[in-house]
Image (cartoon, grey):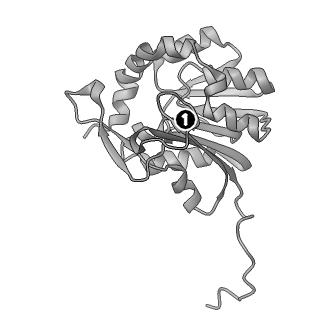
Amino acid sequence: MVLQDNLFTDFEGDRWFERNRRALNAFDASADLPLKLIELYGLSPEHVLEVGAANGFRLAAIHQRTGAEAVAVEPSAQAVLNGKASFPFITFIRGTASAVPLRNAFDLVIVNFVLHWIDRQSLLGAVAEVDRLVRDGGHLLIGDFHPANRLQVRYHHLEDREVYTYKQNYAGTFLASGLYHAVALLTAHHASKQLQVRVAESERIGAWLLRKDLRGHYLESGVNGDRG
């Protein structure tokens, strides 16, 4: 069985980039939830990674604001080519969230509107890869759809194939590990990107800022553990 992740690496990532190239060129940094969180909490990372970075438009804004060393991982060959030409100060690597060809960890890792594309067979592997790339004490920024329930939606751009997007609270998976602390959540309307109080479940998006702390969330019990 072919994982739907492979479809994005083989051709759909390029098609997505071509459909959205004009919107990326007109990127409004003031309306971007990840950038809002970075600004609100005064984050100034030295090393930042974005997984599923397209042509690096968001990383370029972060680099311009903070001077951070920026690395982009992206499955679309066309997006990588465009990014290298547009933003030569960003390091581009072709790859997917479930197999990131990097060893070092980063102060800030961004995964914005990526996890809902991932085949369910690959999801926990992608979560492990993302976690591996966040240094202890660093931050993870996750943006995605934020419904109250888990939703499965047929991907209409590939009607001849059984491909779905999966809308759910992906930050919850990291928080359940006990290794991340929830710093903040911003929610907005998917189309307008405006912060709104009332948004239909299918249109609500969220951006979570999490802080990784491998041991700081554990309390000393005072009870002897292993007696065996």
Give the camera-side residue of 30 and 124: 30
Q: Residue furthest front?
A: 198
Give the camera-side residue of 78 and 180: 180
The image quadrant that residue 227 belongs to is bottom right
Label 1 residue SS:
strand
Residue at numbered disc 1: 112
Give the total number of marks visible in the rendering. 1
Q: Where residue 61 sits: x, y (%)?
A: 70, 22
Give the camera-side residue of 25 and 53: 25
Q: Where residue 191 sits: x, y (%)?
A: 47, 28
> Which quarter of the rendering shows the C terminus?
bottom right
Q: Where residue 29 sits: x, y (%)?
A: 65, 23
**With 151 as the anchor, is 225 left or right in this view?**
right
Q: Going 29% across and 24% down the picture, which residue do you hit?
A: 157
The image quadrant that residue 143 belongs to is top right
Q: Residue furthest left?
A: 160
> Which quarter of the rendering shows the N terminus?
top left
Q: From this view, report whether residue 180 is shown above or below residue 202.
A: below
**With 28 as the anchor, is 160 left or right in this view?**
left
Q: Going 53% across and 55% down the picture, which residue do you hit?
A: 172
Q: For mark 1, does the 10 Å Cα neighbourhood hold few (<14), some (14 to 19), or many (20 or more) residues?
A: many
Task: Check disc 1 and give the amino acid type.
Answer: Asn
Q: From this view, report whether residue 188 is shown above or below residue 135.
A: above
Q: Where residue 132 sits: x, y (%)?
A: 61, 48
**With 139 as the anchor, is 169 left or right in this view?**
left
Q: Going 37% across and 43% down the picture, which residue do you hit?
A: 166
